[in-house]
Image (cartoon, rainbow, N blue to C red):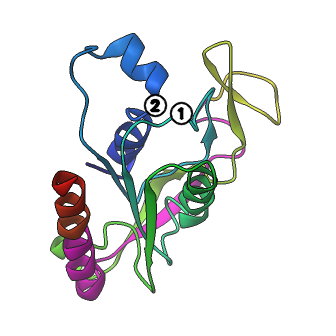
Amino acid sequence: MGFSRGGQSSTYSNLERFRKSHGSPDVQLAAHINVYANCGWSLKDDDQVMKPMLFLHGSADDWALPASCREYAARLFKAGKDVRFVEYPDAQHAYDAPAFKTPLKVAAGQKWSDCRVGEENGVLTNKDTGQPFAFSDACVKKGTTVAYNEEAAKKSFEEVKTFLKEVFSK
């Protein structure tokens, strides 16, 4: 389970090729949960996931736009993978963090949802420039919001419990 950029790690750690390259052949995680992370990178064989996946996002998230994970989850579902995408209305980034009951504008918050990033020969590449992707690329914007949403946080917590009960009952 990972949140924001940690959610990317949780998502991509479910790829068969990464497990083979970096994991133990005898150990696999039982499930992968992505909470408000960006899924907009096109990686080699990114449809080759091994275990159930849950994506949780707020519809008002301007840091990690939910569309990237919605589209990725739909592609995985179409490929017959065990995947679920849940979106919470009016919830922003960090919707589960009570410290942000007063919304916080993060001027330096980097968002790369407008970037078209792919993988070429193991290197993340900006598809528009053909160069290795960097957070200094013109497509990377700044200025995001984080805000707590009690209803989304409660529903998210319940969704995770339900998902894990289903995974461990199989």
Marked residue nearer the N-terminal end (1 or 2): 2
Q: Residue 72 appears at what percent x and percent y?
A: 59, 52
Residue matched to label 1: 48
Q: Please state which amino acid type lies under the numbered disc 1.
A: Gln
Q: Please state which amino acid type lies under the numbered disc 2.
A: Leu
> What is the distance, in whole Å, between disc 1 and disc 2 at their CAs?
6 Å
Among the 4 quarters of the image, the one containing residue 44? top right
Q: Residue at x 24, y 77 (%)?
A: 153
- Is 146 placed left or right of 30 in the picture? right
Disc 1 element: loop
Residue matched to label 2: 15
Nearest the eye: 33 or 105: 33
Among the 4 quarters of the image, the one containing residue 47? top right
Decide if residue 69 is in sight here.
Answer: yes
The span shown in magenta is 134-159
Q: Residue at x 25, y 29 (%)?
A: 28
Q: Residue 68 appears at what percent x and percent y?
A: 60, 57
Mark 2 residue crowding within 10 angstroms, few (<14) / some (14–19) / many (20+): some
Do the CB atoms of the residues marked 1 and 2 lie less than 8 Å apart? yes
8 versus 163 height, above or below:
above
Determine if the magenta segment contains residue 139: yes
Q: Residue 122 appears at what percent x and percent y?
A: 60, 15
